[in-house]
Amino acid sequence: MKCRKCGQRAVIKLRQHNLALCEEHFEEFFLNRVKKAIKDYRLFKRQDRLLIAVSGGKDSLTLWQVLSRLGYSVDGLHIDLGIEGYSAKSRKLTENFARNNGYRLIIVQAKEFLEGYTVPEASRILRRSPCSLCGLLKRYVMNRVGVEEGYDVLVTGHNMDDEAATLLGNILTWQEDYLKRQYPVLESTSEKFLKKVKPLVYLTEREVAAYAVLNGIDYIEEECPLSKGATSLEYKEVLNILESRHPGTKHRFLHEFLQKKPFGAPENLNLTNCSECGFPTTSTICSMCRTKRKLRGDFFDATPP
């Protein structure tokens, strides 16, 4: 198999693009896809200070390196969730990556925001799905740290597979509010609500993994043990079957949706500041602070955080 660009030995075949590429031209392709997302969706400006959420997985570590290679000012934020075995390994890989590349890394422990409990401990106490609690914690911490540290944009490593699976799930359950908000950029609506972007929306999970391997990026390969049985993984499997039979399915499914916006633009939320932490919320007390109250046993709130 030869590279479509130069005739040298190809290292990857991209069926959805009808392309086979050598290492040099695959990296060129990869960087161009990230640059295209930045330009098409106006994700950020050259002078913006970027904070990327890094888990220790291939997507976030790869994106951190790519944005740095493209000349952007980007620092990392890692949240130690306290998941036995898994979190320690994820943190170590992230710290090693940052140190080896000379990047600035901020480490936050879940215990700091969960009244001294880890995510697994807190989910048991609250009798709540660990994935649901983890999502709430990450959204809150990423935004709060980004605002307090003076960053302009929060970057996440969601790739095309992630976004297509989310889209499929939201369509199957007709989550119209979520469908309106699903976009590669979520603009800031408050000085305490950071702009959020997803520069990997033009790249598949397989392409990201190939870039990581070719560039010697050491990342955690295991799925989070708490995500076992998650419907999002099942949606990915379904899309992978379709992609294997009809190359380009994921791209068409996701990006035609993003271009057409069939559910319209998201409605402006009537935000106020949480009476306890001061960060944006749609109610008097934000979901994170209500969760902390429950962990302290201060009161019982029937409204799910």
Image (cartoon, rainbow, N blue to C red):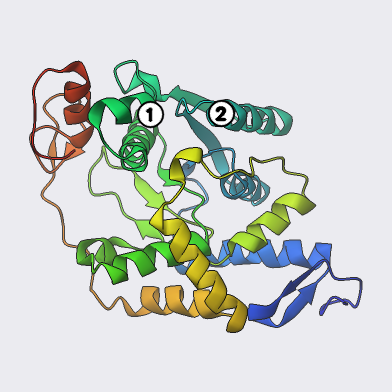
Kindly report the distance in space between the C-alpha atoms of the residues bearing marks 2 and 1.
21 Å
x then y, percent, for residue 100: 73, 30
223 over 288 or under it: above or below: below
x then y, percent, for residue 189: 23, 49
In the rendering, which numbered label is found on residue 119?
A: 1
Task: Report the quarter where the N terminus lies.
Answer: bottom right
- Relative horizontal placement of residue 183, taking residue 94 as reference (left or right): left
- Seen from the viewer's position, the closer of residues 10 and 115 is 115
Can residue 121 be seen in the rendering of this structure?
A: yes
Of the numbered discs 2 and 1, the one sitting upstream in the chain is 2
Residue at left offset 47%, top offset 57%: 233
Name the amino acid, label 1. Val
Residue at left offset 37%, top offset 76%: 257
Residue at left offset 42%, top offset 37%: 151
Tags 2 and 1 in contact by the CB under 8 Å rule?
A: no
Tell how many labels. Answer: 2
Can residue 278 be seen in the rendering of this structure?
A: no
Q: Which residue is mark 2?
A: 105
- Seen from the viewer's position, the closer of residues 289 and 74 is 289
Q: Which quarter of the figure has residue 103? A: top right
Pointer 2 local density, CA inside 10 Å: few below 14, some 14–19, many at least 20:
many
x then y, percent, for residue 62: 64, 48
- Relative horizontal placement of residue 127, taking residue 245 as reference (left or right): left
Instruction: Give SS at disc 2.
Output: strand
Name the amino acid, label 2. Leu
- Seen from the viewer's position, the closer of residues 245 and 228 is 228
x then y, percent, for residue 47: 50, 46
Task: Report the quarter where the C terminus lies.
Answer: top left
Q: Which quarter of the figure has residue 179? A: bottom left
Instruction: Give SS at disc 1.
Output: helix
- Seen from the viewer's position, the closer of residues 97 and 206 is 206
**Eye-nearest disc, 2 or 1:** 1
